[in-house]
Image (tube, rainbow, N blue to C red):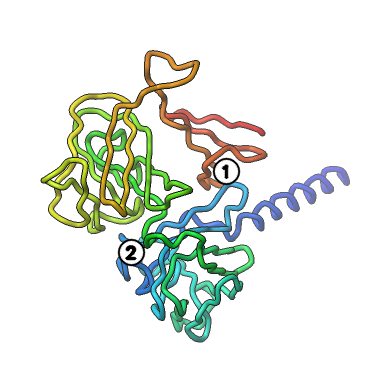
């Protein structure tokens, strides 16, 4: 009996510790406000990213306007959990960690964060320690308005579902360039700025005068994919250009000239990551099959 009680206490402690470790984890975090390009449009808000190793640490590099307020949303709607300043608006100093206040615990004043200088900033929200830090980014060549882009449309595997859009990954050296290698079928496609937003968001669309050029927020003109295959897609939002080219496989081990879409990785808490983390990870392949991997 003593052994059973001891075992129960140990299991309870383990479960409690697991709950504490993931208590602050949220499924998404987005930047919204006058301080970012999309203003108070949730559909045009800035999507932040975390990792499986640090699910409570969310990051984004984005242009912030001077003396203009912003805050962080966890839902693509008003009234959900938010993170913002405390009793007053707070001007953030570059590299200095500042208190991040949950809307569940604040006084309801809805105070915002600001910066004093317009620039690109690395934003880090540490929800486990309730801290936010903005640091002036190394890259200042062009305004950074997106952390990622998504392809949607009848030519993509997810069809017109924003949540199932093909992720265009930001280039590390040039944050205005986004790219993906994806399997496409005959049909239409366009480029979204927020997978959590709605169709009222601003899309990148085809320039009617040139298929290799883009317009932002104009008439709903889409790109047409004529032939099924694997394509390399590259979008440059500074130059307003797009390249859609058939993928040319290279290296050993390519079968039948095609390349499978990359697998998706999740923690046991359901937090998506860019790579398999240490410990137990759930891997979902491009056919939608899931398996558990211990690393």
Dot 1 falls on a residue whose secondary structure is: loop
- Name the residue furthest front: 141
Query: How many residues crowd around disc 2 within 10 Å: few (fewer than 14), some, or many (20 or more)?
Result: many
Residue 66 drawn at (x, y percent): 41, 77
Residue 227 drawn at (x, y percent): 21, 24
Residue 278 drawn at (x, y percent): 66, 39
Please give left or right for residue 117 compared with residue 78 in the image. Answer: right
Query: How many residues crowd around disc 1 within 10 Å: few (fewer than 14), some, or many (20 or more)?
Result: many
Judging depth in this view, the residue of 207 and 218 nearest the camera is 207
Q: Which mark is residue 267?
A: 1
Dot 2 falls on a residue whose secondary structure is: helix
Of tags 1 and 2, the one toward the viewer is 2
Instruction: Look at 55% across and 39% down and name the residue there.
Output: 275
Please give left or right for residue 16 compared with residue 271 in the image. Answer: right
Q: Quadrant of the C terminus?
A: top right
CA gap between label 1 and label 2 equals 27 Å
Residue 146 drawn at (x, y percent): 38, 56
Instruction: Look at 31% across and 54% down and name the residue there.
Output: 238
* Residue identifier under label 2: 42
Mark toward the start of the polypeptide (1 vs 2): 2
Q: Quadrant of residue 159?
A: top left
Please give left or right for residue 192 compared with residue 30 in the image. Answer: left
Q: Give the tally of numbered discs.
A: 2
């Amino acid at each position: 009996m003593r052994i059973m009680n001891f075992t129960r206490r140990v299991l309870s402690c383990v479960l409690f510790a697991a709950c504490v470790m993931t208590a602050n984890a949220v499924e998404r975090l987005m930047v919204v406000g006058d301080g970012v390009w999309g203003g108070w449009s949730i559909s045009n808000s800035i999507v932040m990213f975390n990792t499986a190793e640090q699910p409570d640490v969310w990051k984004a590099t984005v242009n912030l306007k001077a003396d203009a307020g912003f805050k962080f949303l966890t839902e693509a709607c008003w009234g959900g959990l938010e993170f913002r300043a405390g009793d007053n608006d707070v001007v953030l100093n570059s590299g200095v960690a500042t208190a991040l206040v949950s809307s569940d615990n604040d006084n309801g004043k809805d105070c915002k964060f600001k910066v004093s200088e317009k620039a690109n900033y690395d934003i880090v929200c540490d929800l486990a320690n309730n801290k936010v830090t903005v640091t002036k980014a190394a890259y200042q060549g062009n305004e950074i308005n997106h952390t990622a882009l998504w392809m949607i449309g009848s030519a993509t595997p997810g069809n017109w579902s924003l949540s199932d859009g093909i992720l265009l990954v930001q280039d590390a050296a040039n944050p205005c360039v986004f790219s993906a290698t994806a399997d496409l079928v005959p049909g239409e496609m366009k480029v979204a700025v927020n997978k959590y937003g709605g169709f009222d968001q601003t899309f990148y669309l085809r320039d009617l005068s040139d298929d290799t050029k883009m317009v932002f927020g104009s008439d709903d003109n889409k790109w047409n994919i004529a032939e099924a295959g694997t394509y390399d897609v590259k979008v440059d939002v500074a130059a307003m250009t797009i390249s859609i080219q058939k993928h040319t496989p290279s290296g050993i081990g390519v079968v039948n000239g095609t390349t499978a879409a990359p697998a998706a990785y999740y923690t046991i808490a359901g937090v998506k990551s860019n790579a398999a983390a240490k410990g137990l990870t759930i891997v979902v392949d491009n056919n939608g099959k899931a398996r558990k991997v211990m690393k």
